[in-house]
Image: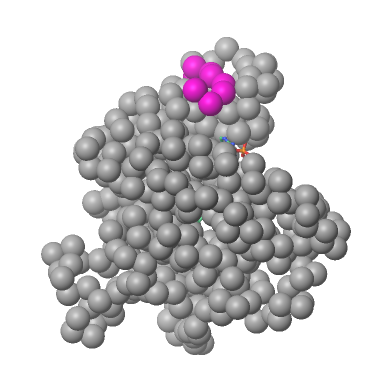
Amino acid sequence: MTQQKSVTVLGSTGSVGGNTLDLVGRSPDRYRVAAVTAHRDVEGLAAQIERFRPDFAVIADASLYGALKERVGGGATELAAGPDALVEAGRRRSDWVMAAIVGAAGLAPTMAAVERGAAVALANKECLVCAGDLMMQAARSAGAKILPADSEHNAIFQVLEERNRSGLEKIILTASGGPFRDWTSDRMAAVTPKQAVNHPNWDMGAKISVDSATMMNKGLEIIEAHHLFDLPETLIDVVVHPQSIIHSMVQYADGSVLAQLGSPDMRVPIAHTLGWPDRIHAPANRLDFTDIAALTFEAPDETRFPALRLAREALTAGGNAPSVLNAANEVAVASFLEGRIGFLDIAALVERVLTETPPTEIGTLDDAVASDLEGRARALEALESFSSPRVAAAP
Ligand code: NDP
């Protein structure tokens, strides 16, 4: 009999968190939920507490603690609230942690899980963008295993031959190109939040959907890949592949290219990290190759999608630049979703903040948090000068 694995899901009420619990819930004999966390979704968290009976559950917005307590009643689950409780959820014992909080808010709890030496499935790319060197160093010191859950990085993780490192020529991240792949800039200027969150292939949270539409997501993924696989920016290519069937590839010295394929369903990479080093069943659609008419590829257009260029520049600059890029992007995306700025303003605002922020080094987690706060403050200030066409906020 296999031993039951205890799992923590940081960001359990989100898209990745929900997919993770979907897999966990299908094998109650194999998995037990140790901890779950949400930001403000009391109802979603309460339903998960009732179903999975975790030891510990956290609502990050402390003002909602009373509502959660009232809704859940006196069960066996210990309830807590606020940022310290979020970190405690990462720190408490469990065999496997899914880091699926969106944005830099996931940094401290994910770091807590890494520092206790857990196996950490990493979906939250923003924490590597903000503090990648620190997190990878902490993982090495604590003996934590970081398992890439982002589909592209999971693909690389599956086909990267560690024993043949010297024969690796480059990695190739695939990008769907998002919903506006073939739109002109003029047309993109009038994009609404509703259009931007409607991804053609993947069903994801609002922030990453907008990031996919601007291609900032791919930019963040270049930085994420740099940290996860210890590769320079120059060895990380991006190719647009609209069908999202090939999730990424590694090219070797003998001309071989190894790719990982699958249907665009996050349960595939999540199952890979949950079962690792074994393989477990995932209820995703199987590929039918006779049904796939064509796999197509094109070069990314950094003129229409400047976010890609900005992310490469931030990675090359190093220091606080990636963290500032991420913070400004979080503010810009939230402002776009609220209808305060236009779609093209997202990258423009990020570029302005990056240009105006003096470089500093990131030596500690406090430095990373400080540069995140500085990036946000500068983005909020810069926002005032953007007088974009007013568009309807996301429903
Ligand atoms: P969602 O927006 O669907 O979910 C985010 C989760 O984080 C929710 O549980 C949310 O709680 C919680 N959360 C949000 N803000 C805070 C905060 N300030 N403090 C604590 N918790 C917070 O996001 P996704 O699941 O789409 O994405 C999660 C991460 O995974 C992102 O970093 C994304 O880039 C990455 N990713 C996502 C993929 C996808 O397919 N969705 C694919 C690959 C990577 P609440 O529900 O209460 O708001």
Q: At 27% from the left edge and 35% from the top edge, which residue is drawn?
A: 117
Q: Nearer the viewer, residue 166 or 58?
A: 166
Whether residue 285 is visible here, answered yes or no, is no
> Splitting the image into 4 quarters, where does residue 110 fall?
top left
**Ligand 1: quadrant of the figure:** top right
> Does residue 78 belong to the magenta stretch?
yes
Residue 289's x, y, as percent? 43, 81
| Left or right position of 214 against 160 | right
Part of the protein shown in magenta: 77-85
Whether residue 217 is visible here, answered yes or no, is yes
Residue 291's x, y, as percent? 49, 83
Rendered position, 189 above or below 21 = below
Q: At 39% from the left edge and 74% from the top edge, which residue is drawn?
A: 237
Q: Nearer the viewer, residue 240 or 288?
A: 240
| Left or right position of 160 against 383 | left
| Left or right position of 188 against 304 | right
> Splitting the image into 4 quarters, where does residue 167 fall?
bottom left
Quadrant assignment for the N terminus: top left
Q: Nearer the viewer, residue 247 or 330?
A: 330
Residue 84's x, y, as percent? 49, 23
Q: Nearer the viewer, residue 338 or 202?
A: 338
Rendered position, 113 above or below 22 = above
Rendered position, 98 above or below 187 = above
